[in-house]
């Protein structure tokens, strides 16, 4: 099992200077290595309709310039076979170019020694911290060039500015945490930095070993995040058979944050909306200051701390709500929302003369702001984490039609977004629209866990119609 524990660092002034310098040098190294990869990528590609089939796009000498064909291993490898012998030995030759493709991670890792010769200040950084920078570049390029399980790739990697590169990692950190210094304070021993005091507010569980440590810069100071692991603890997903008594359905929305199938209405907290006026005042003052001046930096820090406060308030409230929702049930059903589709911009409308027509985007912008403030995607992740921690279960159902059908008879009752009351002409159900959706989500969730064919409102309606037709004489 892997877990992450985060602590506040109380570094001394000299240590803060060292950490800041390391972070800036790591950012520059990241941008340089990414530029190498992107330059090679741009030099070796062309449009499909202009790509020759029998020759290279650019001269081969240009593609592989300054890239050695082989690298020679300088020491025995750490990985060993069953007899204890190293799998790779000193003097082994390994190709840097495989089937025409450059093994960039290996090439750039080997080039770090040359970087330290050209720029002696990089000798002060721990070697594994620099190696982690190369691995970050490799991960970024893999996300750009290789599709995921859904066949999608991320956008083209961007160079990192000072405010967008906020951490560096030790891939292998000592398991002796915490270490007491001469004053008896709890410290973490960071190689080449020293004993850095930190707030040891919760102990690392027994049996867990520290795998990695990541130093993170935030608005209110420096933090360290430990990745801890205990291989003897299995990662198990609770297999609970849901029933009407041990489960509830939840409908998420903007009028009420959550409406449960047992009749509870949770109001929207609106953390960002409540601080919006204060933020706008600070940003107006910031726009009047000279950029990068001392007053400008002070205001930037205030704005960053206010954003941090909003984010922390939101996630704290979401954790409390998640524990409250699981206090009396073991299974929660909710909609499998596609947040990216909810906040997508409206499509442009063109008139007959080629001019753009109003498409309602100004109103949609306010709606998007409220959707981002509620952070439904984050809340679903929090709910799943709390369920795993408590040994309970979260089941997602198809959201299509959950607001347009009656929960009792599954009759379709079309409603616009402004209509907040559900009135079914077939069975006579009269109740709040969101409450009806929560009851319907629970009903579909129970059907989907008992019958594999019924996974949405659409299939449930089709199944009920077929049952009614069979019952007719």
Image: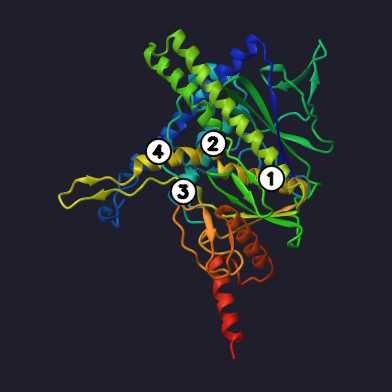
Query: Which of pointers 2 and 1 lies earlier in the amino acid sequence?
Result: 2
> Visible in this render: residue 63?
no
Q: Residue furthest right?
A: 206
Q: Secondary structure at mark 2?
A: helix
Query: Which of pointers 2 and 3 lies earlier in the amino acid sequence?
Result: 2
* Image coordinates for residue 110, horizontal then vertical, percent: 54, 33
Q: Secondary structure at mark 3?
A: helix
Separation of marks 3 and 4 at Cα, in angstroms: 33 Å
Q: Quadrant of residue 15?
A: top right
Q: Quadrant of residue 429?
A: bottom right
Q: Secondary structure at mark 1?
A: helix
- Camera-nearest residue between 101 and 72: 101
Instruction: Give the residue number, with chain letter if any, for mark 3.
Output: 342
Separation of marks 4 and 1 at Cα, in angstroms: 37 Å
* Image coordinates for residue 142, horizontal then vertical, percent: 50, 45
Query: Which of pointers 2 and 4 lies earlier in the amino acid sequence?
Result: 4
Q: Residue at x 72, y 57 (%)?
A: 247
Display colour scheme: rainbow
> Visible in this render: residue 243?
yes
Instruction: Give the residue number, with chain letter if any, for mark 4.
Output: 38
Instruction: Give the residue number, with chain letter if any, for mark 2.
Output: 136
Q: Residue at x 61, y 38 (%)?
A: 91
């Amino acid at each position: 099992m892997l877990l992450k524990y985060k602590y506040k660092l109380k570094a001394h002034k000299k240590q803060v200077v060292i950490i800041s310098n390391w972070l800036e040098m790591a950012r520059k190294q990241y941008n340089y290595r990414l530029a190498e990869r992107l330059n090679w990528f741009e030099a070796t590609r062309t449009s499909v309709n202009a790509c020759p089939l029998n020759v290279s796009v650019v001269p081969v000498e240009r593609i592989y310039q300054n890239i050695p064909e082989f690298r020679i291993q300088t020491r025995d490898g750490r990985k060993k076979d069953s007899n204890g012998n190293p799998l790779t030995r000193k003097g082994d030759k390994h190709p840097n170019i495989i089937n025409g493709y450059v093994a960039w991670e290996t090439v750039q890792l080997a080039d770090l020694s040359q970087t330290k010769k050209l720029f002696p200040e990089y000798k002060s950084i721990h070697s594994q911290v620099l190696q982690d920078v190369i691995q970050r570049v490799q991960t970024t390029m893999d996300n750009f060039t290789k599709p995921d399980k859904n066949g999608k790739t991320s956008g083209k990697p961007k160079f990192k500015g000072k405010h967008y590169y906020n951490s560096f990692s030790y891939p292998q950190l000592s398991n002796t945490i915490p270490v007491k210094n001469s004053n008896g304070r709890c410290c973490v021993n960071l190689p080449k930095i020293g004993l850095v005091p930190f707030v040891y507010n919760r102990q690392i569980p027994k049996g867990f070993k520290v795998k990695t440590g990541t130093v993170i810069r935030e608005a209110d100071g420096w933090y360290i995040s430990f990745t801890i692991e205990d291989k003897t603890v299995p990662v198990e997903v609770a297999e609970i058979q849901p029933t009407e008594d041990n489960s509830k359905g939840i409908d998420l929305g903007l009028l009420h944050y959550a409406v449960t199938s047992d009749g509870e209405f949770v109001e929207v907290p609106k953390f960002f909306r409540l601080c919006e006026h204060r933020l706008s005042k600070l940003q107006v003052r910031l726009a009047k200051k000279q950029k990068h001046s001392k007053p400008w930096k002070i205001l930037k820090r205030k704005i960053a701390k206010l954003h941090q406060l909003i984010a922390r308030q939101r996630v704290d409230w979401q954790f409390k709500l998640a524990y409250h929702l699981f206090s009396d049930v073991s299974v929660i059903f909710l909609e499998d929302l596609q947040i990216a589709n909810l906040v997508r911009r409206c499509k442009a409308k063109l008139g007959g003369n080629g001019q753009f027509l109003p498409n309602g985007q100004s109103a949609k912008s306010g709606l998007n702001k409220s959707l981002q403030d509620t952070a439904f995607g984050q809340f679903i992740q929090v709910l799943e984490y709390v369920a795993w921690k408590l040994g309970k279960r979260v089941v997602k159902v198809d959201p299509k039609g959950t607001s347009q059908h009656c929960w009792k008879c599954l009759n379709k009752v079309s409603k616009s977004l402004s209509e907040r009351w559900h009135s079914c002409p077939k069975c006579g159900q009269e109740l709040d629209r969101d409450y009806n959706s929560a009851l319907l989500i629970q009903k579909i969730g129970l059907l989907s866990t008992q019958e594999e064919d019924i996974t949405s409102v659409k299939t449930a309606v089709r199944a009920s119609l077929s049952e009614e037709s069979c019952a007719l004489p």
